[in-house]
Amino acid sequence: MLTLLFDGIAYGMLLFILAVGLSVTMGLMNFINLAHGAFAMLGGYLTVVAMQRYDWPFLACLPLAFGLSAGVGVLLERTLYRPMYGKPHLDQVLFSIGLAFMAVAVADYTMGSQQQIMQLPDWLRGRTEWFADTPWALGMGHYRLFIIAVCALLTLVLQHVLAATRFGSRLRASVDDARVARGLGIPVERVFAITFAVGSGLAGLGGALGAEVLGLDPTFPLKFMVYFLIVVAVGGTSSITGPLLAALLLGVADVAGKYFIPKLGAFIVYALMIALLIWRPQGLFARGRS
Amino acid sequence: MSAPQAPFSVEQALLGPVRWRASHAVVALGVLSLPLWLGSHALLANEIAIVALFAVSLDLVLGYSGIVTLGHAAFFGFGAYSAALFAKHLHPDPLLGLAVGGLSALLLGAVCALSILRGSDLTRLMVTLATSFILLEGANKWDELTGGADGLQGVIMGPLLGRFEFDLYGQVAAAYSLTVLTGVVLVLRRVVHAPLGLTWQALRDNPLRAQAVGVSVHRELARVYTLAAGIAGLAGALMAQTTGFASLDVFALERSADAVLMLVMGGTGWLYGGVLGAVAFKLLHDLISNLTPQYWTFWMGLILVTLMLVGRERLWQWISRRGRGA
């Protein structure tokens, strides 16, 4: 029982790190970016390649995944994304899903279509059992513990940056009302570029961490696109806690659903989401905005 | 002194697009006679007619009413499976099956319309996507009925109108699909220029103002969504009938995305956009698949990205300026 909850939380934390960048870009520029998963895939592949071909230690790969994904993110933001901001949502959706399709094909071409296998270091492989042989048995995979620890740390850092630094308050001001923020002299464009880079970097990091748990193959951006969007749509775009709660809910619901009613598979998640969005179209944790 | 002139030009502007011209008859006859001289390309023509019908139905939702959707394949697939199951278990007549496919998708659309009434573009995108995923999962898991991942096999169609057997070269199939396509386009041509269609466009351009002048936004959205779902169901039914097969990919995200790409290539908010886009898309697909069969998605993505960066309005401005009349 508890094992299930534990796995669900680990999964949810991972989804949160993957999707938080998307949530901020959506809130800040009102831009629907369906290609967000491509950055996560990039991070995952970078890690696999660095570990297998160049024998990098796992821990060194994580910053690499973050840095390179952020770099690519800022490059794309500068060149391709920027002209799309003022366009209607339909154009943005088509543009970004086009990018996602291209990413899928490029990954297929360079890495092959098979599932990539990640070799975890020994110290992350074990499993700790608590309360074995009781109804409350809790088996914690060390790798999942590691994921939870890293993601929790990142969440705290993000929350601190957002709530207590100058950059954070500028960011919040820009999200709330970009026009007024610009009028007050906040360089909204630069704030946005930095945020986009960090968001892409976090997605890359999430992809690197999640390659073992979620599986990594070229269809990754499309397969998990819906999950990211659920986190954002249900969690709302105005805070960090909304997406966090939504991601945890999604993670636990998905793991539990697949365990208890495997026949229904992903049904539960989708049905739950449609019901939620009919009930509260602005998201579960959004502030009252019409 | 120019006052008497004004009513005339208003009338011209409103009715001009609806008037019949001799060119319409020529085009319609030309399209309908295609199967006769296409020979071995009839199969391709059949395919194009089906995706064109699907794209036209998407145009109602996306182009005319401005509902952002990536899950329109839900209705296409639902129509395809209904028609295939009907033919397999109940009655092999194609026209009855076509009606069943269209009507069942229409009903599904009426139910799903409830889910797209409220919320932002993002909410709608999510809900439509999720609907198609749920149907995909349903068809996958309920394998006693649908055949699961293997697809629904053994669909044998009776002869069309009790007389024309579906042949291997697809001439009957192409004639059948092209006729349905032409019929639907002719009907829709009346609909989109009638007050109903004009209301939808007003809704797309400014929902708030449309509401202020007395349009019931929810009712109109539900109407257009239901109608489009029914037409997508017709397209799906045609596909299942002419190929004698229904598989899970009728629900796939790629199918919805393909249709959106066709629509964007042909021009949205313009009835013939879907048809032209489907022709261009299929020919392009054929060409590129011959060159690099495996990486079609890359080229599709590239086309989408470039089209969006260049700006579809700019590209199609001159055509739509002439064609909006049609």
Image (tube, rainbow, N blue to C red):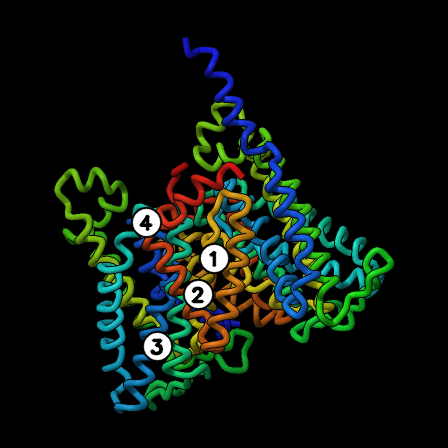
Residues under labels 4 and 2: Cα distance?
Answer: 28 Å
User: Which residue appears farthest toward the left when viewing the image?
Assistant: A185
Q: Position of residue A57 (x, y in %)?
A: 26, 87
Where is residue B271, by image quadrant? top right
Look at discs 1 and 3 and give the one toward the viewer: 1
Viewport quadrant of the C terminus of chain B: top right
Give the secondary structure at mark 1.
helix
Residue position for label 1:
B261
**What kind of residue is marked 3?**
Gly
**What kind of residue is marked 2?**
Met
- The answer to whether mark 4 and mark 2 are in CB contact below 8 A is no
Residue position for label 4:
A27
Residues under labels 4 and 3: Cα distance?
Answer: 26 Å
* Foreground pick, B220 / A13: B220
Give the secondary structure at mark 2.
helix
- Asked if one can make out residue A220 in the rendered structure from this viewpoint, the answer is yes
* Foreground pick, A65 / A4: A65
- Asked if one can make out residue A156 in the rendered structure from this viewpoint, the answer is no
**What kind of residue is marked 4?**
Gly
Residue position for label 3:
A44
The chain ID associated with circle 2 is B
Residues under labels 4 and 1: Cα distance?
Answer: 27 Å
Residues under labels 1 and 3: Cα distance?
Answer: 29 Å
Look at discs 4 and 1 and give the one toward the viewer: 1
> In the visual, does A35 lie left or right of B104?
left
The chain ID associated with circle 3 is A
